[in-house]
Amino acid sequence: MYILMYDDYSREQSQDEIYSKPVKAGKRTYFFDVKATKGGNDYFLTITESKRRIEQDGRFSYDKHKIFLYKEDFEKFVEGLQETIDYVKENYLKNLPQREYTPSYRQEESRFEGETPATTENDVF
């Protein structure tokens, strides 16, 4: 486990970072970062979970967990993630109202009827 101060996240980002997408979810933030290898001729994805904690002295700190995902594993990773999500929806969430587990971008689609959504149900990233 690595403790990261939120302000340190920008310092941790290096010149090899190509793209970053933060996703806030309550006390957690997920970062999807595309980075270049040291040679700059290849790319990989890091998925970071950052969870806010309150220290005994009242300061905030963040627990950070990171996954490195290499391009040759993208397809299998997405397939496994989608299969797992579908399994949970089918076996454990089917009796809940859909809005309790529908991503927020899906809930907001109904407000913009007639517009094409930027993300579809099959999109994971």
Image: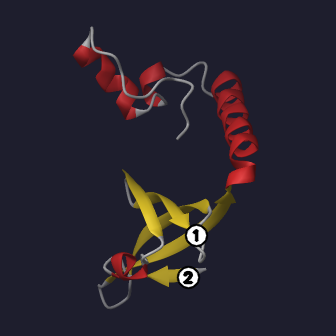
Please state if 93 lies on the left or on the right of 100 as rendered. Answer: right
How many residues crowd mark 2 within 10 Å: few (<14), some (14–19), many (20+)? few
Please state if 85 lies on the left or on the right of 23 as rendered. Answer: right
Residue 109 at what x, y percent from top left? 32, 20
Q: Secondary structure at mark 2?
A: strand
Discs 2, 1 touching: Cβ within 8 Å: yes
Q: Secondary structure at mark 1?
A: strand
Along the polypeptide, which appears first: circle 2 or circle 1?
2
Please state if 102 lies on the left or on the right of 124 as rendered. Answer: left
Residue ID for mark 2: 2
60, above or below 24, in the image: below
Residue ID for mark 1: 65
- The residue furthest top is 114
Q: Amino acid at mark 1?
A: His
Q: Is residue 94 visible?
A: yes
How many residues crowd mark 1 within 10 Å: few (<14), some (14–19), many (20+)? some
Residue 110 at what x, y percent from top left? 29, 15
- The residue located at (49%, 83%) in the rendering is 3
Q: Is residue 29 visible?
A: no
Please state if 12 lies on the left or on the right of 6 as rendered. Answer: right
- The residue located at (61%, 80%) in the rendering is 1
Residue 113 at what x, y percent from top left? 26, 10
Residue 51 at what x, y percent from top left? 45, 67
